[in-house]
Amino acid sequence: MSQSLKPIFLLSLLTCVLSLGSCKKQEVTPSKEVDTSAYDVFLVIGQSNTHWGYGGVDPVLDAPQDNIVQLGLHGENNLKVIPAKEPLDHHTKDANKIGFALTFAKAYAKQFLASDRKVLIIPGGFGGTGFVDNRWNKGDDLYNFAVYRTNYILEKYPNSKIKAILWHQGEADVQSQVYQSRLDAMIVNLRNDLGSSPNAPIPFILGGMVPYWVDKYAVGHQENIIKQTVNRLPKIGYADPRVPFVITKLDNAYDEIHFNAEGQREMGRRYFAEYTRVAN
């Protein structure tokens, strides 16, 4: 390169690096600074019944707590630890809908959380997604995103520990003939990619689908695959929407595939009961 072109080249390179629209798409990478904050981490993933409980946010039942936070996803909150306020930052959040994670987290904080730690929820639910549309298999976009965000937290806050993965999905894959094998493979791969020990796998809790919808469309076979995961893999829990009583709504036919807000809170309690059984 001639001496006369060097200043132009260096200026172009500097402009490229500093530009908001840089020459190469930039990915957010974990900060190298060590933060002494300590979190008990829960990854919450799957499709819409992770967070699509209609009926509005109750100012008392769904009130945030100082010792429960979440990893932000949208806008300027992306990759920031922010208060866990409903609706949580799932991919397909809605202002008037809630999930089971906050109820679960409150029960966990009350019974298990040490005074010098906080609960950190990593929301990752995305409505209408599954294995059949290549969103949750190892290497798929939502799978990779969940792994990246969880490992980001574990690296940035080395005093933190992932305590469980909470999964609710199945409706999108009711016609799939390979759902069981894909579900089991995802659990094994996800645990491995999050540093799970073979002798102490990360607890994994699955939730059952809306009973009215399952019965109406005769998709009990799908429900049974999810339920029987506890017999196929170790450290698995199943939050059963039929036990100790069947979760229903005043109008079961309204938005029949989704739990309402009350049902989501009840599922949160059942997820926690299963976590307690599996993890201790």
Image (tube, helix red, strand yellow):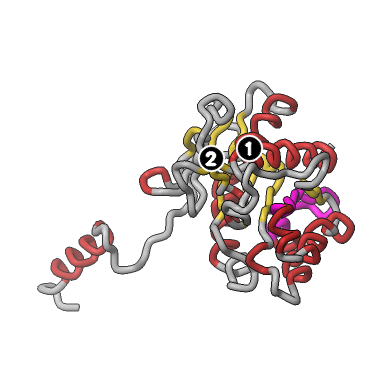
Q: Position of residue 134 (x, y in %)?
A: 59, 72
Which mark sits nearer the N-terminus, 2 or 1? 2
Q: Main secondary structure of the magenta part?
A: loop
Quadrant of the image containing the C terminus: top right
Q: Identify the amino acid type marked 2.
A: Gly
Classify 10 Å Cα crowding around label 1: few (below 14), some (14-19), many (20 and above).
many
Which of 30/32 is in front?
A: 30
Which of 200/178 is in front?
A: 178
The secondary element bearing badge 1 is classed as helix
Q: Is residue 277 left or right of residue 78?
A: right
Choose top left, top right, bottom left or bottom right for residue 175: bottom right
Q: Which residue is mark 2?
A: 55
Q: Which residues are magenta?
A: 190-210
Which of 118/215 is in front?
A: 215
Q: Position of residue 89 (x, y in %)?
A: 49, 45
Q: Residue at 66% x, 21% y: name it.
A: 115
Q: Identify the amino acid type marked 1.
A: Glu
Q: Which residue is mark 1?
A: 262
Q: Residue at 67% x, 69% y: name it.
A: 173
Quadrant of the image containing the N terminus: bottom left
Classify 10 Å Cα crowding around label 2: few (below 14), some (14-19), many (20 and above).
few
Q: Is residue 168 left or right of residue 30?
A: right
Q: CA distance from mark 2 to mark 1?
A: 8 Å
Choose top left, top right, bottom left or bottom right for residue 143: bottom right
